[in-house]
Image (cartoon, rainbow, N blue to C red):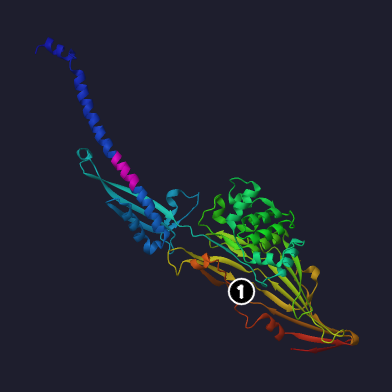
Amino acid sequence: MGRAGSKQFWKDKRGAATTLIALSMTALTGAAALTVDLGSVYLAKRQLQGVADSAVLAAASGNIASGGAGLATSVIQQSGVAGVTIKDLAAGQYKQDAAVVVGARFVAGPTQPSAARLTLERQVPLFFGKAILGRQTLTVRATATAARVDVASFSIGTRLASLSGGIVNDLLSSLAGTNLNLSVLDAQSLISSDMDILHYADALRTRLGAGSASYSELFDREIPLNDLVRAMSDAAATAGARDALLRAAANVGTTRIRLADLIDLGPLGNSNANSSDTQLVVSTLSLLRSLLEQSQGQTYVSTVNLGVPGLASVKVKMAGGGGLASSPWLTVTSAKDVVVRTGRMRLYVEIGLASLISGIASLRVPLYVELAAAEARISDIRCEGNAVTDGVTLAVTPSIGSAAIADIDGATLSDFRTPMAVEPGRVGEVPPVGTRVRASANIVLGGTQPQNAHFTRTDIANHVSRTVSTNDLVSGVAASLLSHVQISATTLGITVTTAPL
């Protein structure tokens, strides 16, 4: 080809489009092949991630250390996805702390793990990538982390006496400052009825028109006492309890109360919807009594006059509070450092006995009991699928204080800032001869060391309560008082002591 022909060749543009099309088709074909493989790998990765999420949830739901791998393998097999292998399964704890970066929140290795991290692998076949990558498969990997939050709710109370019949109306009316007009039938309805706290919260939210407020926001409001009791009636499980609560609501007044001071819902408080599997059940009578006590502020005094067959009179005066009940009555928590305490309690019982000789002698027994703050905390929560070991264990320190046969100044009963002054109690008097008999006795109640109270899943489902008593008293309080009593008689100004009796 001559020089002129060469120049003509380079200037000739015929067939250029065909060449460009051929080159473009080759590139498009390669891109399409790569897209098919990438799409296949992406879908396989998403599928594997779903399997990993389900498997790690199963692993974290039971005993992670010993049974997690078996539970995870079972879920993998049920998924129907072939070729999935467990690359790694680690047991540990998950720190739910926003200040910690997500990748560092899982910590492997504690002796009682509550979280699991699972890594799965799978070989995905390549359709066209062999020519590009020189391999027939590509390894995809998925990692998932799940934490089990072991949550328990618990409350504690100091049992002074069981209530029945008209005593319920007397006690609650004394706390309310007015007669609640509760009949014996009303009292039995309240005693035998339970209430779900979250159902109660839903009823309260509806009554207040609180819309979608969370439980914590609702409980943080200052709400009139009568509205709180009416909401209890709305949520009551029986017709008898509903009627009794409506009768009480009409008389309790409008003192404003924050339920958050009484009930700590913990992690449940962030929700505004009641899960059907969440049961937080308390005694209806206990909740009503606690609301009335809360309305009295830091301290209160309740006086009840009882009629007891065989006794001339029984007068019970009870003072509670004293600033020691700084923790809520009911607490929902996953932490083991939360302590629930009862309020400090003072109880003065004056028992009048029938006269030995009518019109001549009178007998009385003044009994003063002071109880400090009993406390409880969660020492262990286990939700590992074992019917024997699963459940909640509380470390409970029983109430400690003192009991005495003594007279006190009733006006200072609710003054918890100073110790109660006691003096020998006047137990007998014969006016014609001017004889007075006094007695005194004082013992310190035990209970300084915590005791474990374990609740199984069955116990929790059946709302079983446990009683923890002081374990360092040899005999009952009454017997101990009698064995330590000192008696003195004064006649015509002369005191004669006979002790011990």
Q: Amino acid at mark 1?
A: Thr
Q: Compared to 498, does 161 lie above or below?
A: above
Residue 365, visible in the rendered structure: yes
In-front residue for pair 380/61? 61
Residue sitting at the far top: 4
Q: Which residue in the protein does label 1 denote?
A: 448
Q: Residues within 10 Å of mark 1 (few under 14, many from 20)?
A: some
Q: How many marks?
A: 1
Provide the residue span drawn in magenta.
Answer: 39-47
Q: Quick one: quadrant of the C terminus?
A: bottom right
Instruction: Give the side of residue 26 with respect to residue 411, left or right.
Output: left
Instruction: Give the side of residue 280 with respect to residue 35, left or right.
Output: right
- Where residue 82 appears, x then y in whole percent? 27, 51
- Where residue 405 appears, x then y in whole percent? 75, 79
Q: Compared to 1, does 350 lie above or below?
A: below
Within the image, what quadrant is residue 386 found in? bottom left
Within the image, what quadrant is residue 484 found in? bottom right
**In percent of the image, x 89 and y 84: which residue is there?**
431
Within the image, what quadrant is residue 173 found in? bottom right
**Element type where label 1 sits in the image:** loop
User: Is 355 colored magenta in this rendering?
Assistant: no
Instruction: Give the side of residue 136 with respect to residue 108, left or right.
Output: left
- Where residue 404 appears, x then y in whole percent? 73, 78
- Where residue 128 appears, x then y in whole percent? 22, 38
Q: Quick one: quadrant of the N terminus?
A: top left
In-front residue for pair 177/249? 249
**In percent of the image, x 54 and y 71: which residue is there?**
453
